[in-house]
Every structure is written in C-alpha cells, then in structure tokens.
Amino acid sequence: MLRWLGRWLLRVLVAFAAISLAAFAADWTVYKLRGSPQSTVAVSQFMAVPLKGQATEYDFLGTASVACAAALFPQAGKDPCWYLRRHSNQWEKVGTPAY
C-alpha cells in the first residue's frame, strides 16, 4: 500500500513539474513573439524604519511608475504586470537601529 502511494505521489510531482515547465516555456515563447511587451504600473512605496524600544516608523516615499512585463511569469528581470497591479504597495525595510 505504501509503495503504491509513493509511486502515485512521484507521478503527480513529475506531472506538476512538466506542466509548470511547459507553461513557462509557452509564456516565454509568446512573450518573445510579441516583441517583449512591457508596460508600467503606478506603485506606492513605503519604508519601515526600526526605532529604539521595539518601535517602528512607517514612511510614505511616494508613488513611482515601475516597469513590468506583459506576461504570465516574470520575464526579462521584471515582475508581471498582473502581479504589480495586485500588489501595488512596495515596502522597503531598513536595518536595525544603532543604539
């Protein structure tokens, strides 16, 4: 019984890996055939600064236009536009405070 379950688990993992690889390859091909389309998304940027006494200060840095790839997966070192639209707040964390 355990051997049978292990074989099916291995088959499922191999199938998942193959489907993921095929999806990325198809996305890359379409991205290149379309001429590497890129766009921009307005993103709000924030900074979290740790203070003394376990306190944290949150600062709004402003809104910036961030370049993104018009694709399903990250391409050319850029996040996909659909991801940036859903995560339009970017946080930057500064190191620990000097006492």
Image (cartoon, helix red, strand yellow):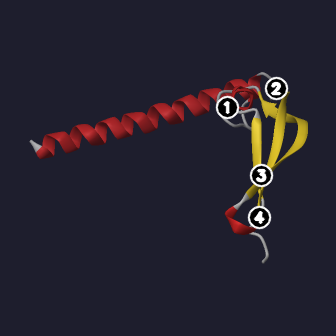
| Disc on the earlier residue, 2 or 1 | 1
CB atoms at circles 4 and 1 under 8 Å apart? no
The residue lying furthest to the bottom in this view is 99
Q: CA distance from mark 2 to mark 3?
A: 27 Å
Instruction: Find residue 35 and report its horizontal and vertical position in percent.
Output: 82, 25
| Disc on the earlier residue, 4 or 2 | 2
Q: Nearer the viewer, residue 75 or 92?
A: 92
Determine crowd level at label 2: few under 14, some 14-19, many 20+ residues with C-alpha closer than 10 A.
some
Residue 51, label in figure: 4
Amino acid under label 1?
A: Trp
Instruction: Find residue 63 and report its horizontal and vertical position in percent.
Output: 89, 35
Give the number of the mark in front: 2 or 3: 3
CB atoms at circles 2 and 3 under 8 Å apart? no
Q: Which quarter shows the N terminus?
A: top left
* Rendered image quadrant of residue 31: top right
Give the number of the mark in front: 2 or 1: 2
Q: Which residue in the protein does label 1 denote?
A: 28
Query: Can I make out residue 76 in this image?
Result: no
Q: Which residue in the protein does label 3 denote?
A: 92
Instruction: Find residue 38 and report its horizontal and vertical position in percent.
Output: 83, 28
Q: CA distance from mark 2 to mark 1?
A: 11 Å
**Relative to residue 47, is residue 38 depicted above or below?**
above
Q: CA distance from mark 4 to mark 2?
A: 42 Å
CB atoms at circles 1 and 3 under 8 Å apart? no
Q: Which residue in the protein does label 2 denote?
A: 37
Give the number of the mark in front: 4 or 3: 4
